[in-house]
Image: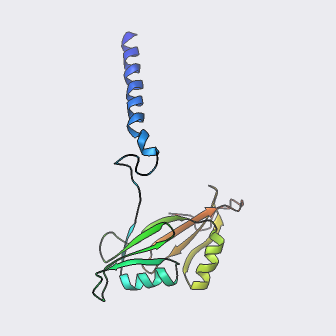
Amino acid sequence: MRGRRIAAAVVVTGIAVGVGAHENHDNGPGSEPTAFTAMTPILNVESVEASIEHYTSVLGFSKDWDWPGEEEDKTFASVSNGEVHIFLSENSQGARPVWIYYSVGDVDKLHDEYVEAGADIKQVPVDEPWGAREMLVADLDGHVLRIGGPSKGGGEESEEGHQ
């Protein structure tokens, strides 16, 4: 019996130590030197220049910068929309396609803007059973932007489902 009590104490102590080791990670950006503070996906694209044009003219992003700056043939770039940034890398760093999830306030409004701009809509906005309204949009290289926002309350499952 005594051995069981000791084992239980060790387990409880181990849990307490484990919880304590992660406490500061939940206190916000910069609270701990090892806490992640941002994320920027890197998408492998066929042409950085064509992708910059597509992201800025069709998908509503802004060009942050491109590289190399002194040459016409760009091989790396950054685009952003709101607080979200994406790096574009020409035929390197990763594989195609990648799925990225974005959150917006009004999926239907963005859908209307994307339709008008000629975006490749793979799935129109639909209320999902998990409480989000989502649509799927593809870029020139087949990367999928899964865009979600508040549900309208319908909860219908999409016809295509998600992979």
Asked if one can make out residue 47 in the rendered structure from this viewpoint, the answer is no
Q: Is residue 108 left or right of residue 62?
A: right
In percent of width and height, residue 150 lies at 65, 61
Q: Residue furthest front?
A: 31
Residue 151 % position (x, y): 67, 61
Say which of 82 and 95 sits in front: 82
Q: Residue furthest top?
A: 1
Q: Is residue 16 above or below residue 115?
A: above
Residue at (41% x, 29% y) in the render: 16
- Rendering coords of residue 148 (x, y %): 58, 64
Residue 109 shown left or right of residue 62 in the figure: right
Q: Position of residue 18 (x, y in %)?
A: 39, 34
Viewed as shown, does residue 141 lie left or right of 109?
A: left
- Image height of 88 relative to 5, above or below: below
Instruction: Tell me if I can see residue 127 in this picture.
Output: yes
Q: Quadrant of residue 14?
A: top left
